Image (tube, rainbow, N blue to C red):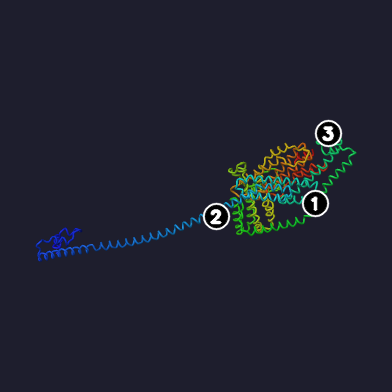
Amino acid sequence: NPQIDRETIDSINEAFFITSTDPHQFELEAMPDNTTMELVEARRECLQRQQSAVSKKLSDVILHNQPSYIKELKQVQELQKSLHNAFVICSNGRRYESLMSVGVRCSTASLALLSNQQKRQSLYTLWEALQTIKTLQHSDVRLTELMEEEDYAGAIQLCLECQQAAATYKHYHCIKDLSAKLQDTLELIEEQIDVALSRTCRMFDSTLYSKLQQGYQLLGKTQSAVDQLLMHYTACIHNTAFQVLFGFAQLNKSENNLQKKQYKDICSLIDQDFYIPCLLELCKGLWAIMHCYHNASKWHKTNRDQLTSSKIACLKTLLSSSVQSLKSPAHVQGPVLTNTALHVLRLCGSYLKMCDVLKPIALDVVMCMSQLFDLYFHAVYSFFSTDEVGISRCRLDRLHSTVSHIETTLFTAEVTGDNTMNHQQISPPNLSPAVDLHQASSYYGITERIVATESLVCLASQFELLHPNLEEMIPALKKAFLQQFYSQTVRAAVDVRVPSYLGVAVHAIDAPTIVAKMSMVKWDVREIMSQHNAYVDLLLNQLTNFKTTLFAAVRTVVLPEEVVKVIWHHCIAICNQVFVEGFSNVKKCSNEGRALMQLDYQQFLMKLEKLTNIRPIPHREYVELYIKAYYLTESDLHQWVQQHAEYDHKQLTALLS
């Protein structure tokens, strides 16, 4: 009975629920002194009932809390499993930490070793660079020794190698001054070679002459060496003749200021008694010069086979490198084209498709294509051409003829007998206001000139490829029209480069300033000069600045090599005109002054070859012939003036006066 069990449990003494209570001792102490067997048995039974009630109650509580127990037991098991996993993780972590610490120590040591090796390599590279720089700084001593030994080829080779090494280490600040010093040294070597070359005109030494030729070959100036040698022989002949005549003229004590007299005047001062001795001395001096000239000619003849072999070897090397360059899959620069040129090509493609469908109108289609090209040709020419000095008259006449023909056939409407027009008149195109060809900041529209002109040249090349196809489409009787179109217009497109880029080249130099500087030079000198005049350096500086500015101005398009060549040809022609104009303004000039003119122009040509990479310099005969004309006799000079109409009236008058 639950009620009885509850009452039995309630009857249990509270002392039994205290943990520190000893139930045996407690019961013994609770027994009275006169305890009987019946009393003990009754108490035992009471305690058994109480124990039974408590056990039953406990069993009921356990049964009632069995699900919670199972749940808690499961949570304990899971907690135990988690603790075991945590223990494994911590153990592994500590083991890995130990291994990582060992690995970090090893990695740190390895990285330190690599860092030290890199520092060692950098320091070794720096040491080699410093050793090379030290050698370069002391190279002037060796160059001086080579020059004293007259080993010009070795000196030039050493100087070129030093320049190459200086270019390799140009990122060091100390190399900048050294590079300029090496360039000055190379120019000094060139001057000393030139002086040594002038000495061979009086005393020829084959060994020295061979060294000089090797030096000029290393410099890449074999042609300049020939020009300089001829100039030195001319000066040597003049000086020898003048010195001999001057010596005999001094015997005539009635004359003073012989230094200021001309060669012809000094000849008239020789007494008749000294004619024969003077002539003998003059012949001896000239014979010595002729003997040296003969030896030089003999040297070149002897070494001709060797030079031919070297040229053949160079040609083979060049051909081999050309073949390799053709085999290499290098990037090919595409043509410069405008959207208008591409549109013209698309229209031509549409026209050709029309010809396949409607063959009877093929002639009209070809004529329309030619009109499209004529319109583009005329637009580029009218927008960008510049008629200035320096252009070949033949090329200008051909261009003017082509443009006049286009204007007549394209922009002028033909009127028939009944006053009706047989085709619609086309208005000439106008240049966009956004294009300014007179602005120095854009370098006079150089980018627009390149894009327009080179797109015209590319369009002409595409028409050349279409020539066989167009010729098959039209009747045989009308092929003359096609031939005229190609010969007069298409093939003249490349000539538009000449007047187009002239508008840029005319701003390369300040011609009036150069001419003014030339007029300030004293040309009536009495001795052969070895140093050129300052106006030559000024002119070269202006050309150098022009080159730098030109390449800096062209940013959005590629500057084709053909364009650079055309511009340089214009600049050279303008400079040649400046030289002739400056020489024609000279009022007083001696034979030594004429030699100085040749020296100035030769120095200009030598420096210009380095600047432009053009060899040989074109149109140089225009200046050289004008200088040499001063040495002609009066009768030959009149004949020469009649044969050379390329000089203006003022320049020819200066020669005759």
Instruction: State whether residue 403 appears in this view.
Output: no
- Total label count? 3
Callout 1: SS: helix
Does 334 sit left or right of 246 as displayed? left
Q: Residue at x 57, y 51 (%)?
A: 123
CB-based contact (under 8 Å), mark 2 and mark 1 = no
Q: Nearer the viewer, residue 245 or 583?
A: 245
* Alpha-carbon span between mark 3 and mark 1: 41 Å
* Alpha-carbon span between mark 2 and mark 1: 62 Å
From the viewer's perspective, is the residue at label 3 or at label 2 nearer? 2
The tag earlier along the polypeptide, 3 or 1, is 3
Name the quadrant of the C terminus: top right
Q: Nearer the viewer, residue 628 or 369?
A: 628
From the viewer's perspective, is the residue at label 2 or at label 1 nearer? 2
Callout 2: SS: helix
Does 642 sit left or right of 382 as displayed? right
Q: Name the residue under label 2.
A: 117
Q: Position of residue 559 (x, y in %)?
A: 62, 49
Q: Nearer the viewer, residue 224 or 157?
A: 157
Q: Position of residue 482 (x, y in %)?
A: 67, 54
Q: Which mark is residue 256?
A: 3
Q: Which mark is residue 297?
A: 1
Instruction: State whether residue 15 appears in this view.
Output: yes
Amino acid type, callout 1: Ser
